[in-house]
């Protein structure tokens, strides 16, 4: 299962919620983390936040694309239907 996220680093608080629709019509889950976008810290914080909020192990998330971009694609390995629903619920 792929999860597209639009990440805002250097935020006041770690949070997930809402949908961002880009110019191409693609939907992205909005997330913000307090971590700085240096040496992968924001990416790590994003994975930790998703894992915590959805109740899924961090090790099951793999960053597929966007390591230096605000728009990131993560792959959740071996996602069950319940896990897919938990991630979908994060959008609000």
Image: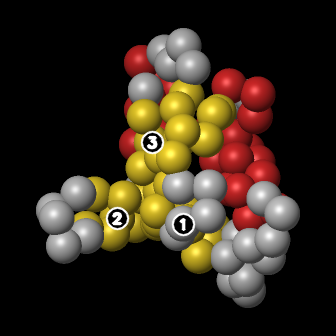
Tell me: residue 61, above or below residue 41.
above
Residue 24, position in %: x, y?
16, 64
**SS assignment at label 1:** loop
Residue at the image point whose x is 51% and y is 47% from the top: 65
Write down the quadrant of residue 2 in the picture. Answer: top left
Quadrant of the drawing holding the N terminus: top left
Does residue 20 appear left or right of residue 38 in this picture?
left
Residue at the image point whose x is 25% and y is 68% from the top: 21
**SS assignment at label 3:** strand
The CA span between labels 3 and 1 is 15 Å
Which is in the foreground here, disc 2 or disc 1?
1
- Could you say which disc has been placed on residue 14 in the image? none
Residue at the image point whose x is 63% and y is 34% from the top: 62
**SS assignment at label 2:** strand
Viewer can see residue 23: yes
First in sequence: mark 3 vs mark 1: 3
Residue 31, position in %: x, y?
55, 66
The CA span between labels 3 and 2 is 12 Å
Q: Nearer the viewer, residue 62 or 50?
A: 62
The residue that mark 2 highlights is 19
Viewer can see residue 13: no
Quadrant of the drawing holding the C terminus: bottom left
Does residue 74 appear left or right of residue 61 in this picture?
left
The residue that mark 3 highlights is 3
The residue that mark 1 highlights is 69
Q: How many marks?
A: 3
**CB contact under 8 Å: marks 3 and 1:** no
Does residue 68 appear left or right of residue 26 in this picture?
right
Q: Residues within 10 Å of mark 2 (few under 14, many from 20)?
A: some
Write down the quadrant of residue 69 in the picture. Answer: bottom right
Tell me: residue 29, above or below residue 73.
below
First in sequence: mark 2 vs mark 1: 2
């Amino acid at each position: 299962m792929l999860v597209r996220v639009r990440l805002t680093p250097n935020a006041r608080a770690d949070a997930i919620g809402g949908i961002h629709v880009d110019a191409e019509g693609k939907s992205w889950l909005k997330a913000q983390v307090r971590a700085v976008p240096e040496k992968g810290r924001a990416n790590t914080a994003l994975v930790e936040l998703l894992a915590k909020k959805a109740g899924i192990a961090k090790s099951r998330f793999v960053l597929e694309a966007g390591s230096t971009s605000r728009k990131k694609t993560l792959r959740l390995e071996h996602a069950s239907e319940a896990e897919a629903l938990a991630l979908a619920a994060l959008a609000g």
